Image: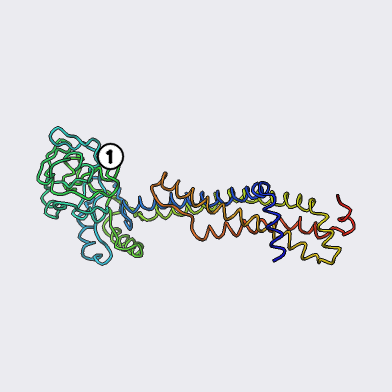
Amino acid sequence: MNSLRMALDSITEKKGRSFLTMLGIIIGVTAVLVLVAMVTGYNSDMTAYYEKLGVNKVTVKLSWYDTSRATDLMAALYEYAGEDLSDLVEGVTPDLSTRLPVQYGGGVAENTTVYLGSDQYAACSNYILESGRDILPFDIENRSMVCVLGAYTANNLFPYTDPIGKTVTIGGYPFLVVGTYYQKDGGAEDSMDHMAVVPYTVNRSLLNSDRVDNIVVKVSSSKNVDKVMSRLELWLAEQVDSGVGEYSLEDGNSAMAESNDEMTSLSVVLGGIASIALLVGGIGIMNIMLVTVTERTREIGIKKSIGAPRREIVGQFLLEAGILSSLGGLVGIVLGFGLSLILGKAMYGLVVLPGAGITVGAFAFSMIIGVVFGIYPAVKASNLQPVDALRAD
């Protein structure tokens, strides 16, 4: 307790110098927490983006050497998934889209993304019906000129009226609005809500082609993705003549997984770079502790002359270094949390705070840095000879 009191007295006696000594530790801990938190926030933002797109999807990509002998696999895959994969798959839809103006009266929603989908498009793409009805199998079979509007498109064209039952013009063709989707991406012009979906069987009208070469299969759970890909591989091998065309399967979760891996690596790199500031702070502590030893040489001589053991001298200076680094770490944690909260809201609109693991790790590292860099000054103080120390001015 006596050593603790003396250490605190030494720190509080020279407040300005103590603060400057802690400043490197404060900056280091703050930088580590803020940088790692920002990477975490970015990762959360990207994960939310992928989830809006819809996760657990497998994309079937077809290419044909001889288009005259190309096979229309959409209807066959739809049937196969509904019968043989019904316990693993939630839906199948073409991956077809184009950008066209959608008009109603004098209003125009320019550059609207028009998706050509099946009756299972909403399930595959994570849209939820708000009003009216969705695309039905009947619409697919009969090439019905109907559409379902995204939140932005509906609000832009029909700000004060119910769009259900109205006729809009898409690519010069009239389409009956039969439903609208809930807003899922902020409802802005450049969001996923600036869209409309029509039956894919009207693709000859809008795309001048009736081929479907990209098909999305929505899997019920991430744990079933590999199983579904294996089953699709076998099925496609039977359906696609290798002399006519080829196919490939793409795991829709791989992009999100790669993004998570990249952000984890970036977090480690940035945290390591920020940790350099902690090392600089440790050097600052060592420098000040050496100055403290010089200033307190006479005090050390008196202690040693009355029989104080070396471990007591070493312990006193190590305790002081540990307190300085710990206080710096605590202040850095407070600043790190505050800045992370402010920047997270400003950059991502999210509450982003450092995790418990990185917080405890940064504090422990700061304390260890202080003690490690305090060893040399403490040992130097303990090695002073009493006679030499008492002669010091």
- Report the residue marked by disc 1: 189
Residue 220 falls left or right of residue 158: right
Which image quarter is the N terminus in? bottom right
Q: Please identify the residue farthest to the top as the structure is shown.
A: 106
In terms of depth relative to the viewer, which is nearer, 380 or 14?
A: 14
Choose top left, top right, bottom left or bottom right for residue 323: bottom right
Q: What's the residue at 21%, 44% (across, down)?
A: 196
Numbered disc total:
1
Instruction: State the scheme by which the image is colored.
Output: rainbow
The relative height of residue 1 versus residue 61 in the rendered view (above or below) is below
Residue 34 point in image, percent of width and height: 51, 49
Residue 269 appears in the rendering: no
Which kind of residue does numbered mark 1 sit on? Glu
Q: What's the residue at 72%, 52% (across, down)?
A: 286
In terms of depth relative to the viewer, which is nearer, 134 or 68?
A: 134
What SS does tag 1 mark? loop
Residue 355 appears in the rendering: yes
Residue 389 point in image, percent of width and height: 86, 55
Residue 37 point in image, percent of width and height: 48, 52
What is the crowding at mark 1: few (fewer than 14 residues within 10 Å), some, or many (at least 20)? some
Residue 129 falls left or right of residue 377: left
Residue 353 falls left or right of residue 1: left
Residue 271 point in image, percent of width and height: 55, 51
In terms of depth relative to the viewer, which is nearer, 357 or 285?
A: 285
Choose top left, top right, bottom left or bottom right for residue 364: bottom right
The relative height of residue 314 versus residue 281 in the rendered view (above or below) is below
